[in-house]
Amino acid sequence: MVSVLAQEANAPWAVGRYGYFVDKYPHDKICLPNYAAHHPDYLHETTMHEYAHAIVLNLAEGHVPRWLNEAIAMVAQGGADKEIAHKFARREIDWLAPNQLNVELVSELEGEERTSLWYAYQQSAWIGEYLVNLKGEAGLAELLKAFADNPFLKELFMRAVNYPHAEEALKQVYGFGQDVLFERALKWLEDGGVSAS
């Protein structure tokens, strides 16, 4: 189900004013900002972004961390900003660790702090682009399925020892975990990987 938010929802105190995805039963719901209805390019980008969240939720059965969820959604919308990539590469913008990036992505800050939220989305986007560079978009689909393919006993063990699903799925598909991914994605940007995207 897709809805367009009322004009009044575009207010500083409104959560999700730029669009959002909600897991509902029996259908998932995408809410698009009102101004997207008047700008075809933005409507396409926003719809692709939010629809990607539905795909992530359903393929990975809700186990994907926020940073990876946004990485895939940003890849789907085509939203990686090359100028921001160059700033990451020159260390002008902090490159956050997985847990820090998750925290930043759930913030709904306004004003000057809103820039740091944009940077968090861009970091996710470039991590997604790096994964696409390694195995194509098919690799992202394989990764999402790896979140949900664990036998019952393995799933139980992972929960008991608090082993992150992202760590297990990344190692299964790419051969390395979250910390290595973050290090390699930044190194890729520093080595000019963005120019190949």
Image (tube, rainbow, N blue to C red):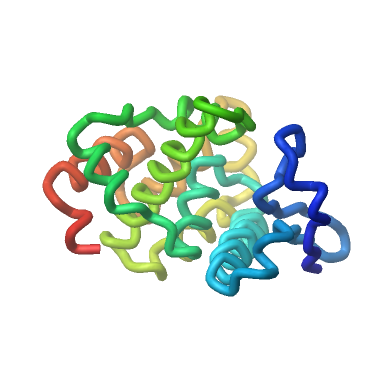
Position of 4 with respect to 121 (left or right) is: right
Q: In which quarter of the view is residue 97 placed?
A: top left
**Residue visible at 60% across and 62% down?**
46
Q: In which quarter of the view is residue 92 placed?
A: top left
**Residue visible at 31% across and 30% down?**
93
Q: Is residue 160 above or below residue 59?
A: above
Quarter of the image containing the C terminus?
bottom left
Q: Please identify the residue farthest to the left as the structure is shown.
A: 191
Q: Position of residue 123 (x, y in %)?
A: 38, 42
Q: Could you tell me how many numbered marks the image carries?
A: 0
- 81 and 187: which one is in front? 81
Q: Position of residue 70 (x, y in %)?
A: 52, 49
- 67 and 20: which one is in front? 20
Quarter of the image containing the N terminus?
bottom right
Q: Position of residue 134 (x, y in %)?
A: 27, 60
**Residue visible at 31% across and 41% down?**
181
Q: Is residue 121 above or below residue 13?
A: below
Q: Is residue 38 above or below residue 92?
A: below
Q: Please identify the residue farthest to the right as the structure is shown.
A: 26
**Residue visible at 48% across and 56% down?**
74
Q: Position of residue 190 (x, y in %)?
A: 16, 42
Q: Please identify the residue farthest to the bottom as the structure is shown.
A: 40
Q: In which quarter of the view is residue 47 placed?
A: bottom right
Position of 25 with respect to 157 (left or right) is: right
